[in-house]
Image (cartoon, grey):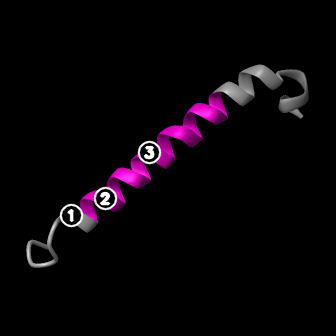
C-alpha cells in the first residue's frame, strides 16, 4: 500500500483534495440556495 510507505504525502494530498472538494460543494449549495428557481 502506498499509504504505508508515504503516509505524510498521501495525507497531505488527500487532505487538500478533500478540503477543496468540501469547499466547492458548500459554495455550490450556497449559490443554488441564493439564486432563485425562476432564473434556472
Whichever of labels 3 and 1 marks the residue nearer the N terminus, that label is 3
Query: Tag 3, which secondary structure?
Result: helix
> Is 25 included in the stretch rendered in magenta?
yes
Quarter in which the N terminus is drawn: top right
Local packing at callout 2 (Cα closer than 10 Å; few below 14, some 14-19, many 20+) is few
When the figure is inspected, residue 1 is found, relative to residue 6, above or below; the finding is: below
Q: CA distance from mark 2 to mark 3?
A: 10 Å
The residue wearing badge 2 is: 30
When the figure is inspected, residue 31 is found, relative to residue 7, above or below; the finding is: below
Local packing at callout 1 (Cα closer than 10 Å; few below 14, some 14-19, many 20+) is few
Whichever of labels 2 and 3 marks the residue nearer the N terminus, that label is 3
Residue name at image x 50 percent, y 48 percent: 22
Residue name at image x 89 percent, y 22 percent: 5
> Is 17 included in the stretch rendered in magenta?
yes
Q: Which disc, if any, is residue 34?
A: 1
Task: Answer left or right for 2 relative to 11.
Answer: right
Q: CA distance from mark 1 to mark 2?
A: 6 Å
Q: Find residue 38 and report its horizontal and vertical position in percent.
A: 9, 78
Q: Find residue 4 and report its horizontal and vertical position in percent.
A: 91, 28
Amino acid at each position: 500500500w502506498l499509504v504505508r510507505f508515504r503516509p505524510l504525502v498521501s495525507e497531505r494530498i488527500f487532505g487538500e483534495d478533500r478540503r477543496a472538494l468540501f469547499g466547492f460543494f458548500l459554495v455550490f449549495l450556497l449559490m443554488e440556495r441564493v439564486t432563485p428557481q425562476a432564473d434556472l
